[in-house]
Amino acid sequence: MNTLLNPQLNADLHCHSVVSDGTLTPELLAPRAKANGVELWALTDHDEIGGQARALAAAKALSLPYLTGTEISVTFANKTVHIVGLGFDHHNTALAQGLRQTRGGREERAREMAQGLAQVGIHGAFEGALTFAGNPELISRTHFARFLVESGVCNDTSEVFRRFLTENKPGFVPHRWAHLRDAVQWITAAQGVAVIAHPARYGFTPNEEYALFTEFKNHGGQAVEVVTGSHTAAEAQIYAATALEFGLAASRGSDFHSPDESHTDLGSLPFLPGKLTPVWELLVDRIQ
Ligand code: AMP
Ligand code: MN
Ligand code: MN
Ligand code: MN
């Protein structure tokens, strides 16, 4: 059997670099993954594939099997949902265009976030956040959080999110991201597999969650993250059952952003629960 088909593979198919809101370059993530025992890796920057060629080259140099990746911001039932794409052709122009369009509203949103923060006495947050953004097209709440920690307003990024950057807080700006259907279709048209990221994080009602999984599947989505840095063991069990219920494959990824901020390092997750189809089984021909 191809050893990459093992359901108990140390696959890490979700993490971020400086091309979105991570703090490490693709060239530093690859050896970190390798040193931590990762056997199949994907870099999944938010709304961006600009780091894919670098990640692939860095993985190749270490003989680390690689899948292309991204994490697309979507609005569904008035909440932000993340759809991971894996194993797509990163030269596909429709995917690149869709991601560019999704990134497009970020600067304006960031300026409005800074205005909200200025109203509670925090000035210069747009410029401050930008100094933390490795990619000016991808200014995110994470960069604001780092700026507010560095300025001494908060002790850590979780405190910033809690006090300033979540719904009804001064730096929160509601935003319309991509449509679920478009995100899934950009990925699948580029020969990739679409994955619902960290489903336990959305706070949907059971009806909303049922609608998300049903529509995702109808649009051609094929997998769900079951084991991920922000899921508890109980949540992994819940979404293992959901994967079986909807006939979806299961993915596994740390969602690593930074050695200083992330609780879960690359490659240090529990294995997928048994009985599930690992997403890498669908992608065996796309591994590079
Ligand atoms: P954005 O795409 O600009 O809305 O930023 C979303 C990112 O913020 C996520 O991908 C996480 O990296 C980060 N994030 C969201 N919520 C939290 C939180 N409660 N604590 C720390 N980071 C968070
Ligand atoms: Mn992030
Ligand atoms: Mn996410
Ligand atoms: Mn992520």
Image (cartoon, helix red, strand yellow):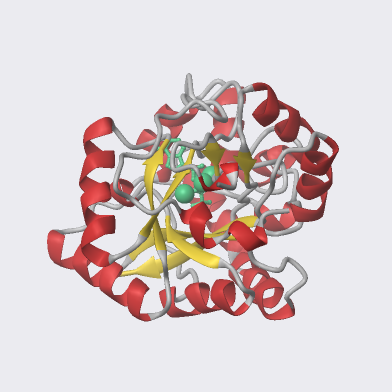
Horizontal and vertical percent for residue 248? 34, 62
Q: Where on the picture, by quarter, is residue 103?
A: bottom right
Horizontal and vertical percent for residue 34? 69, 28
Is residue 47 something one can see in this rendering?
A: no
Q: Where on the picture, by quarter, is residue 187?
A: bottom right
Q: Residue at x 80, y 34 (%)?
A: 62
Viewer-proximal residue among 3 and 246 = 3
**33 displayed left or right of 245:** right
Horizontal and vertical percent for residue 280? 52, 53
Viewer-proximal residue among 261 and 53 = 53
Is residue 204 something one can see in this rendering?
A: yes
**90 displayed left or right of 190:** right
From this view, report whether residue 213 is shown above or below residue 231.
Answer: below
**28 displayed left or right of 181:** right
Viewer-proximal residue among 220 and 173 = 220
Q: Where on the picture, by quarter, is residue 32?
A: top right
Question: Which residue is situated farthest in the front direction here?
Answer: 1
Viewer-proximal residue among 56 and 137 = 56
Q: Residue at x 51, y 73 (%)?
A: 183
Q: How many marks?
A: 0
Horizontal and vertical percent for residue 158? 42, 30
**205 displayed left or right of 195:** left
